[in-house]
Image (tube, helix red, strand yellow):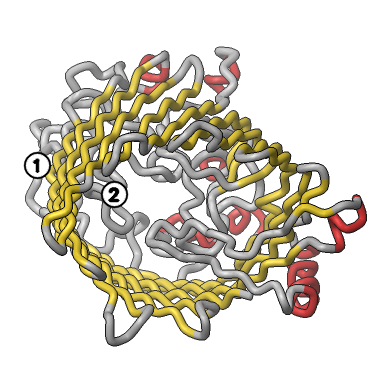
Amino acid sequence: MKRLTIMFFILLPLSVIYAHENIYVHHLKSNMIPIYEVSPQEVDSFSDMFLQGIFYGRLRMNSFGFRWDTEVEGKRKNHAIAAVGGSLIYKSAYFHGFAVTAGLYTSQVKGSLDRHKASLYKAGKDAFSRYDLLTEGERGMTSLAEGYLEYKHYKSSLKVGRQLFESFLTKSNDTKMIPNAFEGFTLSSKTLPHTHLKMGYFTKQKLRDHSTFHHMLAYGDDPNDPYAQYSQNDDSNMHRGLKQSELQALGIDDRLMVFEVENKSVNHLTFHANYTAVPKLLSYMMLQADYKVDVGDWSVIPSFRYMKQFDDGAGVIGGANRKMLSGGYKNPTSLDSTLYAARVDVQKDTFKLRFGYTDVLDEGDIIAPWRGFPTGGFTRAMGQYNWDANTKSYMLQMDYTFESMPDLQILSRYVVQNFDDNKVGVQADTDVFTLDVAKIFEKKQLYVKTRYAHVMGKSDTIVGNGVHKADSSYDEIRVEMNYLF
């Protein structure tokens, strides 16, 4: 770990010299997906494949402040945490269609909580590894999160190794210090007219708060490791009942398969379809349609999403609730689930207004621990998980870019989240207000963003068995700076 960190800070200044004439733009959207505007080209020799490659550097700082309305001893603690680091990515040129990419990331943190209270961090918890801190005292992490061989031909690309992969349920989700990454192979193709196809097969994942790659859909439970729960997939939306030891005993390898298509053959219509599966556990189908209607200078874009989660064996193993608290569920051993979502965007020039609605039927919880959010783009707000069973959400969102101050953007959301009061394993209702303010400076090289969330939870929700649900009210603020070169 320490050797990798030292290596990163040695190579970083060298990359500035090497890439001086190859500055790129990390077009940072709200979902933080990088787009390289300068890419390596095809060369005629194997040596030039590496000599004409490009380094992409990023210096990054993130700070987080979090305040609960009500602290709870041993469970909730107000805190602050800051992280510095960045990434150094190398992309070789293409030789007969082949190229290699390697990405080294680091995050070094300082927080207000003691080491043994690492599990109490909510804001900023993805800036460090709880497992490394609790087991080794490591307050930072450095990881070779990307390392893959690529073959590109015409409009298709095959990648094998560690990589970022964007699909309906798998995202890099690069809003903290180190993105979410996957290990396996992917195929992306635009050979069919107006169509983008993606396929992926993954054997391992590295969540943002892990320094090493781990299981895709298995919760750590090694009895000889007191911190095993943080060693494998411990994402907030991971099912705690899908334990590593039980899956191994059943001979289940948690591999992830993805097939996704986007088609724009019909004018003004965009159609999305996705199939994702972990064989013998869960599978998913998603259909979505977006249609654009121009009304004078305005555009109106209605969108509809349908998602079905199929229980292929996971429900019997872990139960209908991801926290293993299945009281109040119609079928406590079934993870079959259904999501309906709708939204309408109204936009003109640099202004956009969005009205969103999602409805998760009263079946099992939706399990999606790969940083793609089932309600994303419709009703999900910062830090929220609003796709538990029998949850309805309503959102109003506004986006605006100031014409008088180019590259100054604001995004604000107000979301009403109506959870099921009769389910002990589901949180109490909340209203959520968020505000993002972002500014890009110096020819798009310096990016500064501030995010604020105010969550107003119900404090008087009592389940039928007398359990009093915790009040989820809190305030959170984040400040992020990126310098890209």
The N terminus sits in image quarter = bottom right
Lower position in the chain sequence, tag 1 or tag 2: 2
Q: Residue at x 26, y 36 (%)?
A: 289
Left or right of 194: which side holds 110?
right
Neighbours of disc 2 within 10 Å: few (<14), some (14-19), many (20+)? some
Q: Residue at x 35, y 82 (%)?
A: 406
Percent position (x, y) of residue 201? 59, 29
Residue type beneath disc 1: Ile
Q: Residue at x 9, y 42 (%)?
A: 462
The correct choice, above or below, for 416 with respect to 187 in the image is below
Q: Is residue 218 visible?
A: yes
Q: Quadrant of residue 474?
A: bottom left
Percent position (x, y) of residue 260? 45, 31
Q: Residue at x 38, y 25 (%)?
A: 284
Judging from the image, what secondary structure is the residue with disc 1 in? loop
Q: Which residue is mark 2?
A: 377
Residue 462, label in figure:
1
Percent position (x, y) of residue 388? 25, 36
Percent position (x, y) of residue 429? 13, 48
Instruction: Tell which of 337 and 447 is nearer to you.
Output: 447
